[in-house]
Amino acid sequence: MKKLRILILLFALSLLSQNIKAQVEIIADGRLQTILEQHISFNEISRTAVGYRIKIGVFTGAGSKQRAFDLRDEIVKNFPDLRAYVFFEEPNFTVKCGDYLTKLDAFGPFLNLKTMFPSASIIRDYINFPVLSKEDLVLPEYFEEEE
């Protein structure tokens, strides 16, 4: 019985040690390539991505535009590192801030803003690409260029 186990084990190892090479041929409609190229060109033109923002306030009616811009200025004054935006979606002026890729990224600033603006909420929105810090642009010490 022991010899049979060893024989099976050796047979399995010999199968695993063989070099198996395969060739795959992809047959696809030419329109698929066209759609892929259109998708790539759209993404190169578009400077937005799906992410999260913090909605601070929505204003409607007389003087709503001025109130929205005053709120934006107050946010910028109290939180200088936070980007604030005013959007007009008829008939409302909406004040949103931040550009976060994940809801977790937005949660820290949301807690700070919630103390000043109790109606603040995290919403899913199209965001601008985040600004890279100068440290992100520096190559690490272990970086090696390929020849």
Image (spheres, rainbow, N blue to C red):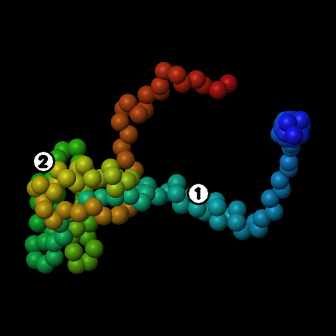
Q: Is residue 73 visible?
A: no
Q: Farthest residue toward the top?
A: 141
Quadrant of image for the N terminus: top right
- Residue sitting at 23 percent across and 50 percent down? 109
How many numbered marks does the figure carry? 2
Residue under numbered circle 2: 78
Query: What is the secondary structure assignment of the residue under circle 1?
Result: helix
Type of residue at label 2? Asn
Residue under numbered circle 1: 40
Of residues 33 and 103, the one drawn nearer to the viewer in this rendering: 103
Type of residue at label 1? Ile
Q: Residues within 10 Å of mark 1 (few under 14, many from 20)?
A: few
Above/below status of 48 relative to 8: below
Residue 125's x, y, as percent? 35, 63
Quadrant of image for the C terminus: top right
Residue 2's x, y, as percent? 85, 36
Of residues 141 and 9, the one drawn nearer to the viewer in this rendering: 9
Above/below status of 12 relative to 121: above
Above/below status of 18 relative to 44: above
Q: Quadrant of residue 53?
A: bottom left
Q: Is residue 124 left or right of residue 79?
A: right
Q: Identify the mark nearer the N-term, 1 or 2.
A: 1
Residue 87's x, y, as percent? 26, 66
Q: Is residue 112 left or right of residue 36?
A: left
Q: Is residue 67 visible?
A: yes
Above/below status of 34 relative to 137: below
Q: Residues within 10 Å of mark 2 (few under 14, many from 20)?
A: few
Query: What is the secondary structure assignment of the residue under circle 2?
Result: helix
- Residue sitting at 17 percent across and 50 percent down? 112
